[in-house]
């Protein structure tokens, strides 16, 4: 009997509810030259009967039953039975796309230097409905470095050469917590083998609350931490320079920790620092990391103990406003001075609209953005192209047009946005950054809505997010299928989905921005968008723009992460009215009450938006410092819109006061209805 091209390995343990779907997805592959090896690891449900029925109907199905040995032992048994040179993994509650095996086998045929290849994948729920997309790096070098941060290859997506896996010891049969794949990946990498992920979505991974990953989260996390630490020690012994570079790359990419580090901090009290962070700190102590970068990372992990040092370095490096935010958040200064607000000089509007197109070095989309924007540009409008990184803004001759102006911002990147806003002649402003495609009717519908209502300041069209490194089998980027809320000011801020390229707004909104845009760097468009949403309720249009998410990879994100944390805190607390919770015990009742009154004022003047991202913080602060919570507009807002949270927080302080909330809420709701009835229609 000739050997099949691919052996699919499936370790099965009590997967009866989903096993048919998993097996059917394998047998329906476009590449039929396969065998499916099902190892029943002591199932006590109907899994054995299901597997037996498939084996009777299809000669490609092989069933082996054993006493429970854990997923590592079951997968090793499947490896021993495999006859093909390539082995593909699939869990008993997952499924694969019809062309997965053909695509991965062809890739391994064409790339003999690659030992294992994974893919991107869909997540699905227990009803097999797609819930989202997960992505991993699609190049070997990034995969290698990111493996020391988290699982940069997803085991149920891989196809590997059987020989290297066996040579490296296969799977640890003692690993019962679901980490045997992490150890196997490191064994391959440390032995010098290369692995990568294809940019195609080839697997559907089930978010199964009864699966191994969910049932044993803490022991699995502890095992993975141990595996990661041992692997870093091993690579350090092999090549210390490479270990140093991995640490530098990882901390610059994830200066506040990766998603795996966040998971560790949730599950394990006082966890040890990651190996990369420990090495980063060693390198910083030796002077091999710039002082500002080192201190930023220290602050991201421990704000209180590094506030003064970071604030001093930021001021020294030309970021005095950010330094003030650091001190304000740490409670070293009570209020952030208002003089740091960005004042944009107002000029008479001579046009209806100005569309700003920021560009950077290597912006290959610029010509297409200008061309398609001209097609949708209304009469009496202009386009301003400007560089945000100091590079020259070269508009190709093919798209040069009388209505397109190019600003000279080379060498003045810090003030590029201010110069662009100051030069804009439109009554309304819009933006189109790299990676954004406007709906053909976006500008027209936005302007029509704004012109029809003088009280409307901002129009917004949500975006469909596409992933350029998560493709279908034809190479097309896939739209994010994640469920969405109804987009409002609250949900846009709460999910941090505010996108300046999805907005058209009145010019006066940026006359006095509450952020110092000279200091926000690569996060400037995000900071502007967030500050606009913090002060204006958007009119959400029934059309969709398109947004292409950045690819997964390594980058220096230290300053961007720092800026986003500081600006989000500043805007979410009514311009820095609430310091970090660690500072609250140091505030007197008088100081706390004064800050709360500032919050009340901000809410009444529409300078504070309470949304899911700041809801808990504002609730806790309000109930802690309000002498009579029912007399504060902020608490009344919480009581009307978030009664369970508000009453629960107040009950910790006073059961009697909490009891009064029920009739008080009814009065507030009644009053709101009366005001709504009396308010003239817009």
Image (tube, rainbow, N blue to C red):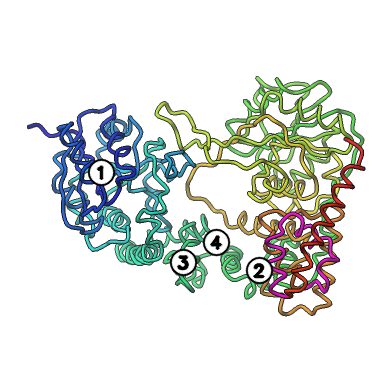
Q: Is residue 240 visible?
A: no
Question: Which comes before the other along the chain, label 3 or label 2?
Answer: 3
Badge 1 vs badge 2, beta-carbon distance below 8 Å: no
Pointer 4 residue:
256
Please name whichever residue, 432 or 172, is drawn nearer the observer in this view of the structure: 172
Q: Which residues are magenta?
A: 625-653
Pointer 1 residue:
160
Question: Which comes before the other along the chain, label 1 or label 4?
Answer: 1
Badge 1 vs badge 3, beta-carbon distance below 8 Å: no
Q: Is residue 590 left or right of residue 369?
A: right
Please name whichever residue, 467 or 361, is drawn nearer the observer in this view of the structure: 467
Pointer 2 residue:
310
Q: CA distance from mark 2 to mark 4?
A: 15 Å
Give the crowd class for mark 2: few <14, some 14-19, many >=20 residues within 10 Å.
many
Nearer the observer: mark 3 or 2; the answer is 3
Point out residue 471 in the picture as x, y percentages from the top left corner.
Answer: 44, 33
* SS for callout 3: helix
Point out residue 5 in the picture as x, y percentages from the top left corner.
Answer: 19, 33
Question: Which comes before the other along the chain, label 1 or label 3?
Answer: 1
Badge 4 vs badge 3, beta-carbon distance below 8 Å: no
Name the disc covering residue 267, or none: 3
Nearer the observer: mark 4 or 3; the answer is 3
Vertical position of residue 43 compared to residue 324: above or below: above
Q: Is residue 262 visible?
A: yes
Give the crowd class for mark 4: few <14, some 14-19, many >=20 residues within 10 Å.
many
């Amino acid at each position: 009997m000739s050997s099949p091209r691919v052996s699919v390995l499936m370790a099965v343990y009590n997967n009866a509810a989903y096993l048919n779907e998993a097996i059917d997805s394998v047998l329906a592959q476009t590449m039929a030259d396969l065998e499916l090896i099902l190892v029943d690891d002591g199932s006590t449900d109907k899994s054995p009967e299901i597997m037996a029925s498939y084996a009777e109907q299809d000669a490609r199905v092989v069933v082996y039953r054993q006493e429970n040995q854990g997923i590592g032992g079951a997968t090793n048994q499947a490896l021993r039975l495999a006859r093909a040179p390539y082995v593909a993994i699939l869990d008993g509650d997952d499924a694969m796309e019809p062309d997965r095996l053909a695509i991965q086998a062809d890739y391994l045929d064409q790339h003999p230097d690659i030992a294992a290849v994974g893919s991107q994948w869909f997540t699905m729920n227990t009803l097999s409905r797609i819930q989202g997309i997960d992505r991993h790096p699609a190049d070997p070098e990034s995969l290698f470095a990111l493996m020391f941060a988290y699982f940069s290859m997803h085991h149920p997506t891989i196809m590997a050469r059987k020989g290297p896996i066996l040579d490296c010891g296969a799977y640890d049969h003692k690993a019962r917590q679901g980490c045997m794949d992490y150890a196997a990946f490191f064994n391959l990498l440390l032995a010098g083998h290369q692995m990568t992920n294809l940019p195609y979505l080839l697997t559907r991974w089930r978010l199964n609350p009864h699966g191994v990953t969910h049932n044993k989260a803490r022991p699995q996390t502890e095992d993975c931490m141990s595996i990661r630490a041992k692997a870093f020690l091993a690579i350090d012994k092999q090549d210390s320079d490479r270990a140093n570079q991995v640490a530098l790359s990882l901390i610059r990419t994830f200066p506040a920790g990766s998603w795996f580090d966040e998971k560790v901090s949730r599950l394990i009290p006082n966890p040890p620092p990651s190996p990369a962070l420990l090495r980063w700190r060693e390198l910083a102590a030796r002077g091999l990391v710039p002082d500002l970068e080192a201190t930023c990372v220290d602050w991201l992990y421990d704000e209180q103990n590094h506030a003064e040092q970071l604030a001093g370095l930021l001021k020294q490096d030309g970021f005095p406003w950010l330094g003030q935010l650091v001190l304000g958040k740490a409670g070293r200064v009570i209020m952030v001075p208002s003089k740091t607000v960005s004042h944009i000089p107002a000029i008479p509007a001579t046009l209806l609209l100005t569309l700003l197109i920021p560009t950077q070095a290597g912006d290959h989309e610029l010509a297409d953005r200008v061309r398609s924007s001209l097609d949708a540009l209304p009469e009496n409008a202009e386009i301003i192209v400007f560089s945000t990184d100091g590079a020259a803004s070269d508009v190709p001759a093919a798209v040069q047009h009388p209505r397109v102006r190019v600003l000279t911002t080379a060498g003045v990147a810090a003030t590029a946005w201010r110069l662009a806003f100051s030069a804009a002649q439109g009554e309304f402003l819009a933006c189109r950054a790299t990676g954004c495609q406007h709906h053909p009717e976006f500008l027209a519908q936005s302007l029509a809505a704004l012109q029809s209502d003088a009280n409307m300041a901002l129009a917004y069209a949500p975006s469909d997010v596409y992933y350029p490194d998560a493709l279908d089998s034809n190479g097309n980027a896939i739209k994010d299928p994640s469920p969405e809320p109804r987009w409002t000011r609250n949900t846009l801020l709460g999910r941090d989905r505010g996108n300046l390229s999805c907005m058209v707004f009145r010019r006066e909104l940026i006359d006095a921005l509450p952020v110092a845009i000279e200091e926000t760097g690569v996060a400037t468009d995000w900071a502007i968008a967030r500050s606009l949403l913090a002060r204006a309720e958007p009119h959400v249009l029934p059309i969709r723009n398109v947004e292409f998410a950045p690819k997964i990879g390594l980058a220096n994100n230290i300053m961007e992460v720092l800026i986003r944390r500081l600006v989000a805190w500043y805007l979410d607390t009514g311009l820095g009215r609430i310091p970090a919770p660690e500072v609250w015990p140091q505030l007197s009742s008088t100081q706390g009450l004064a800050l709360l009154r500032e919050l009340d004022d901000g809410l009444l003047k529409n300078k504070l938006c309470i949304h899911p991202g700041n809801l808990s913080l504002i609730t806790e602060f309000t109930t802690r410092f309000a002498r009579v919570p029912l007399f504060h507009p902020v608490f009344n807002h919480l009581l009307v819109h978030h009664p369970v949270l508000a009453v629960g927080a107040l009950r910790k302080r006073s059961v009697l006061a909490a009891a009064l909330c029920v009739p008080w809420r009814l009065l507030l709701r009644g009053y709101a209805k009366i005001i709504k009835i009396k308010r003239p229609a817009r």
